[in-house]
Image: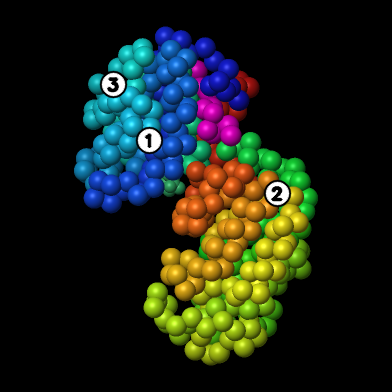
């Protein structure tokens, strides 16, 4: 796979696909983490003398229709602040011309008919805009779309940007040759949505820590009462099979409530004492301390998903304790997935995690062992 950093970009027209899909409400960006991560690539290309055109999707608008709610306008403004020069927003991509030394951003590629279906004509038109196509959008590398895959197939030259390269390096470091012991933390609500992740990690980890609704299914599989908690009873055999494969320590205590609400009184109890009308909404302090101890001795930590309903203060202590233990550990720590990043932000430990991935679905698909099509095409092009 070619790397942008190895190419001479001086005077060349460079089209860069980033994942600038950030949360925006009423025109205000609530987390600019993906823009912060993309900015160094754009600066690097400009400093190398390129003319830069950036493209990204934002949300999931209806194809073929402009919708202000999904406009890249706030992204262009914020990106300009981050790179220290204005970024022009190009509303009509067909009129985009890349001028040496300049930077512009195309309007949301998902307004374009044929983007999601990876239409060849659209991909060829994108490719014709540039001399070099740079794929830097790790967060969208699991999508085979015209702006991620098709354009890479037809551009004169295609390469990986530095952000994509560092994301892949971090994942490889954590998964291909992890420094032992390797401990993975997988939280979130359902086993069913993370089954492939759990299967893969069960093969690789010395310990697999489960949290959130996922832990409830494992508790039930081990014969503990889970009351009214979120639990997938149809997956109890699967959970038992995974427990046979690797060590999956279960929380000895939990925090419960009678309703799923921020102001429901929180009661800590032993996992064995959960009542018929209880809902488990967090791990308890003893479980958190045991996990923290395990993380202290880890060589590699992979973290995906909160272990409790951390959006509610009364049920945030478990996830906070995990976040702090990951931050304090000397292990190579890699965190990824939307909710995980929100937790890292909430507990302010971002600068103490070895690598924070910008990927949500792409991160999970990589961990599941799937091929990311927008990466595969860059590898194909380098070999053919
Ligand atoms: C993400 O937020 O995970 C990526 O930007 C991909 O977005 P998508 O799921 O809408 O393709």
**x, y (%) of residue 319?**
55, 64
Q: Secondary structure at mark 3?
A: loop
Quarter holding the N terminus is: top right
Tell me which colouring the rendered structure shows.
rainbow
**x, y (%) of residue 327?**
61, 52
* Foreground of the two, 376 or 285: 285
Left or right placement of residue 42 versus residue 242 in this view: left
Residue behind mark 3: 96
Please tell me how crowded label 1 is: few (under 14), some (14-19), or many (20+) other residues with Cα within 10 Å.
many
Q: CA distance from mark 3 to mark 1?
A: 14 Å
- Specify the label residue 330 is tagged with: 2
**x, y (%) of residue 225?**
61, 85
Q: CA distance from mark 3 to mark 2?
A: 48 Å
Magenta run includes residue 144: no
Pointer 2 and pointer 1: residues touching (CB < 8 Å)?
no
Q: Is residue 111 above or below residue 368?
A: above
Earlier along the polypeptide chain: callout 3 or callout 1? 1
Q: Nearer the viewer, mark 2 or mark 1?
A: 2
- Specify the label residue 175 is tagged with: none
Q: Residue furthest top?
A: 11
Left or right placement of residue 221 versus residue 46 in this view: right
Q: Secondary structure at mark 2?
A: loop
Q: Nearer the viewer, mark 3 or mark 2?
A: 2
Residue 338 shows in this picture: no
Q: Is residue 215 above or below residue 203?
A: below
Q: What segment is highlighted magenta in the picture?
A: 155-166
Residue behind mark 1: 56
Q: Secondary structure at mark 1?
A: loop
Please tell me how crowded label 3 is: few (under 14), some (14-19), or many (20+) other residues with Cα within 10 Å.
some
């Amino acid at each position: 796979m070619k790397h942008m950093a190895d190419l001479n970009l001086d005077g060349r027209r460079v089209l860069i696909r980033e994942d600038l899909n950030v949360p925006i409400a009423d025109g205000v960006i609530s987390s600019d983490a993906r823009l912060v991560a993309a900015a160094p690539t754009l600066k690097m290309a400009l400093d190398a003398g390129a003319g830069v055109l950036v493209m990204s999707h934002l949300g999931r608008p209806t194809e073929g229709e402009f919708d202000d709610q999904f406009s890249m306008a706030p992204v262009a403004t914020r990106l300009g602040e981050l790179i220290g020069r204005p970024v022009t927003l190009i509303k009509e991509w067909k009129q985009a011309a890349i001028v040496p030394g300049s930077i512009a951003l195309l309007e949301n590629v998902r307004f374009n008919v044929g983007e999601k279906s990876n239409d060849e004509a659209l991909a060829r038109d994108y490719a014709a805009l540039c001399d070099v196509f740079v794929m830097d959008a790790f967060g969208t590398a699991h999508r085979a779309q015209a702006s991620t895959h098709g354009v890479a197939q037809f551009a004169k030259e295609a390469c990986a940007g530095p952000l994509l390269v560092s994301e892949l390096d971090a994942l490889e470091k954590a998964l291909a040759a992890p420094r032992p012991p390797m401990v993975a933390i997988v939280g979130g609500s359902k086993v069913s949505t993370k089954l492939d992740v759990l299967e893969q990690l069960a093969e690789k980890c010395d310990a697999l820590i489960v949290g959130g609704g996922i832990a409830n299914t494992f508790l039930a599989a081990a014969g503990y009462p889970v009351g009214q908690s979120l639990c997938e009873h149809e997956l109890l055999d699967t959970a038992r099979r995974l427990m046979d494969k690797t060590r999956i320590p279960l929380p000895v205590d939990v925090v419960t409530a009678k309703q799923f609400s921020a102001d429901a009184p929180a009661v800590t109890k032993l996992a064995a004492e959960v009542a018929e009308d209880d809902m488990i909404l967090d791990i308890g302090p003893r479980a958190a301390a045991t996990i923290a101890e395990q993380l202290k001795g880890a060589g590699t930590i992979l973290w995906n998903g909160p272990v409790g309903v951390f959006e509610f203060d009364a049920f945030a202590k478990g996830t906070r304790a995990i976040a702090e233990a990951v931050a304090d550990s000397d292990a190579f720590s890699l965190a990824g997935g939307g909710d995980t990043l929100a937790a890292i932000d909430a507990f302010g430990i971002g600068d103490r995690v070895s690598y924070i991935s910008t990927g949500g679905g792409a991160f999970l698909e990589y961990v599941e062992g799937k091929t990311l099509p927008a990466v595969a095409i860059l590898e194909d092009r380098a070999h053919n």
